[in-house]
Image: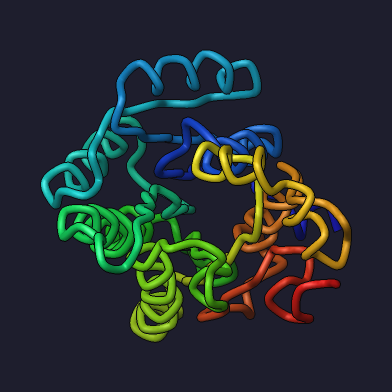
Amino acid sequence: MQELFSVRGKKAIVTGGTRGIGYMIAEGLLAAGAEVFISSRKADACEAAARELGKLGTVHAFARDLSKEDECRGLVDDVAAHADAVDILVNNAGASWGAPIEDYPDSGWNRVMDLNVKGLFNMTRFARPLLEKAATEGDPSRVINIGSIDGILVPAFDNYAYSASKAAVHHLTTHLAADLAPTILVNAIAPGPFPSKMMEASLRERGDEFRAMTRVDRIGEPHDIAGAVIYLSSRASTFVTGAVIPVDGGISTTGPAH
C-alpha cells in the first residue's frame, strides 16, 4: 500500500508554490519524497519559500508571471535546465478580484482570466513534452488543476471573474483529460476554505461562519490538500482522469450545514 501511494523520486512543478495552498502542496510532495519546482511572480517570495521548503527535500524556485505566454514557456525552460522529464504538473497559480458588479473593472477581469485560465492552459501545453517523457505504461504523468468550489456553487463574494475562471478550469480539465490520455491523466481539485493569503481577510472576519458551513466543523488543513494531490499523483489513481474532486468539508456536495 505504501508503494501504491508513493511519489518518492518523482519530479513535480507546483505553480504559485510559495504561499497558501500551493505551499501546502509543495510541502506535502517534498515530505513524501518528490523533487519540487515552484514558481511565484516575486523573486523574494521564491527565495523565502525555497529556504523553508528546502529543509524537507530538493526544491527549485523561479520568479515568473504566468499570466503571460512567454513567462509560461520560460518557466518550463527553467525546469528543463534541471530535469529532462517531469511526472507531475500542479497548476495552482491564481488570482482573484472582488468588486460590485457595477464597478467591476475590465483590468481585474483580464488579470484573473489571463492567469487562472490562459496561464493554466499554456503551462500544460508547454510542459507536455516533459510530462510525456516521464510517463510509463503503468504510471502515466499527471496534471492536477486547482479549481475551487466557487466554480461549482454561487460564491459568497462579488468575485465574478474568479468564479467564472474556476468553472472554466473545471471544464478545461475534462477537455484536456480527453485529449492527453492515456499518457497524461488530468484531474482537478476544488478546494473549499483553506488558510491562504487570498482567504486571509475573509477568514479573519467570517471564519466561524465558514467553519459552520462545513459538515466537519473546520476549515481545510495542509494535510487535506496535500493528501488529495498525492493520491492523484500516485499509482493509486491511474484509473482516474477528467475528475473534479471537491476538498471542502462537504460544502459543495451536501450543502452548507446549518
Where does the image place residue 42, in percent across and percent down from the top left?
31, 25
Q: Residue at x 21, y 47 (%)?
A: 72
> In percent of the image, x 48 and y 53: which residue is there?
88
Q: Residue at x 87, y 57 (%)?
A: 217
Examine the rendered structure and indicate whether residue 249 appears above or below residue 33.
below
Count of numbered tags: 0
Hey, which residue is sitting farthest left in the picture?
A: 70
Splitting the image into 4 quarters, where does residue 176 fall? bottom left
Is residue 8 among the parts visible in the rendering?
no
- Residue 148 makes an appearance in the image: yes
71 with respect to 156 (left or right) = left
Q: Is residue 174 left or right of residue 66?
A: right
Residue drawn at the location 43% of the way across and 63% of the way down: 158
Residue 222 pos. (x, y %): 71, 42
Q: Position of residue 250 (x, y in %)?
A: 77, 71
Q: Which of these two is toward me, 133 or 172?
A: 172
Q: Quarter of the image for the C terminus: give it.
A: bottom right
On the image, which quarter does residue 78 sit in?
top left
Q: Quadrant of the N terminus?
A: bottom right
Judging depth in this view, the residue of 54 and 254 nearest the camera is 254
How has the structure been colored for display?
rainbow
In front of the other: 30 or 44:
44
- Give residue 208's position: percent from left, percent from top: 79, 49
